[in-house]
Amino acid sequence: MNQGDIVMKLARRTLALGAAALLALNALPAAAAEPVQVQWWHAMSGVLGERVDELTKKFNASQQKYVVVATYKGNYDELINGTIAAYRAKRAPQLVQIYERGFMTMLLSDATLPVQDLLTQRNYQVDWNDFVRPVAGFYSYKGKLMAMPFNSSSPILWYNKTHFEKAGFAKPGETWQELEKQLYTIKQKGISACGSVLAGDYHWSLIENYSAINDLPYATKANGYKGLDTEFVYNKTLVVQQVARVKKWIDDGVMEIAGQGLSPEQLFTSGKCSTYFASTAAHSGIERNARIDWSATYLPWEQGKTPKNSTIGGAALWVLKGGKPAEYDGAAAFLAYLAKPETQVWWHKVTGYVPLTDKAYQMAKIEGYYKDHPTREIAILQLGRGTPTDNSLGFHFGNFTQTMFAQREEFDAMVAGKKTPQAAMDAAVARGNDVLRQYEKLNKGKY
């Protein structure tokens, strides 16, 4: 065999082996594509964290293309700070849960993708107009939903039915004036040790929502919706009278500040205090722990006022830039799943947060859910009461958390007797406006 024959023989053998290998490969079953992972950072611990895990399991089991991986990253403040650091390091998740006070920080960060665009571009049929207006209004910018509302709540008034009945009242009065008389009567008759307990987030229920429900301007420029040059003005409204009332209740022993290891909720559920201004999301804890006959009702309003809607607390899910197209497909699929009425109703029942769309609310109502759980409907009705005004739609303030901390410090100074209610609110507004001016300067032209 000459050299040319040897070369040809080797070539034929190589081709034969290649063909055999190709046939063998074709004979193998096609390997299933790995599902695309979507990373979601959240701030829900304890029982609510368990519900988040349950939610992602439900979504992951509903389809095979995507797997949402939910990871607890600390409380709201820790989460937003950790997200900013991760984004700068290019290690951010595709989805992150940010509380409502972080709206402006996220909106002007240039690090997010509008959820309404994300879902519309992928042909998901979401009725954006069906979202409860104070909820959608809080997370919208120029008519577009920027983040997907997730865990939304509103403060309500919880009360001890036995205490009120012993004092001769069927339920709490509708106005602050009526409620005040009742709480003083309960105290004077020795029915309870305290008429009310001050919640940890009192600034939300007793100042911010007080302003919205009584249709009082909290700040100029429609509470920040119409410009970064907004200024706080709540020191010129009935808010001063409101904080003076709280101070009087504390001084008179009608309202108690929690301490010595007991939370405000424990002071209510144990039967020590007769009322508690807190989120509707407290349902799960109160239903589980209360040893009293309790109920709930709307937040009071000022005598002579027509009450408006309350505003929300909680958080929304933001989509962060820097991901891959397939990851955004998965994020959109998950967000569309969250927007389904069936998902909304399930989340509402297991957490106490409000359903975010009217379809979901109607679904729960048709099921008869509120006949057995009437207090679960209060926050929904309160949020949907009347037509929102510039004073009640919500709050869009840069560095809102910092301004809130300043307000709380001044409130504490008032409670300690170091400042009058007017002086405390004047100082809170002045300090808050300094924060707003700094934010305006840093973000000029972005809003």
Image (cartoon, rainbow, N blue to C red):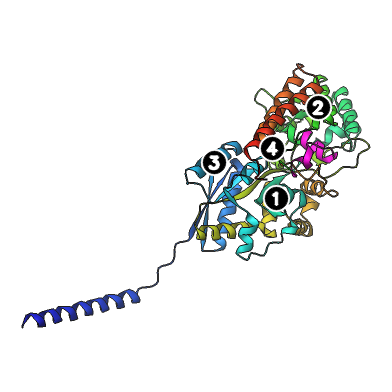
Q: Does label 4 or label 3 sit earlier along the sequence?
A: 3
In three-dimensional space, the C-alpha distance between marks 4 and 3, rounded to whole angstroms, equals 37 Å
Report which residue position mark 3 lands on.
84
Disc 3 packing (10 Å; few <14; some 14–19; many ≥20): some
The residue to which callout 2 is attached is: 243
Residue that label 1 marks: 141
Q: Position of residue 301 (x, y in %)?
A: 87, 37
Give the SS element for disc 1: strand
Label located before the other in sequence (2 or 3): 3
Distance between the alpha carbons at the discs numbered 4 and 2? 30 Å
Residue 74 in view, yes or no: yes
Is residue 223 covered in magenta? yes
Verify CB contact (< 8 Å) between mark 1 and mark 3.
no
Q: Residue at x 68, y 62 (%)?
A: 126
Q: Is residue 108 above or below residue 168?
A: below
What residue does disc 4 label? Answer: 289
Q: What's the magenta region?
A: 207-226
For the image, the number of numbered tags is: 4
In this view, the residue in front, 193 or 249, is 249
Vertically, is 32 above or below 239? below
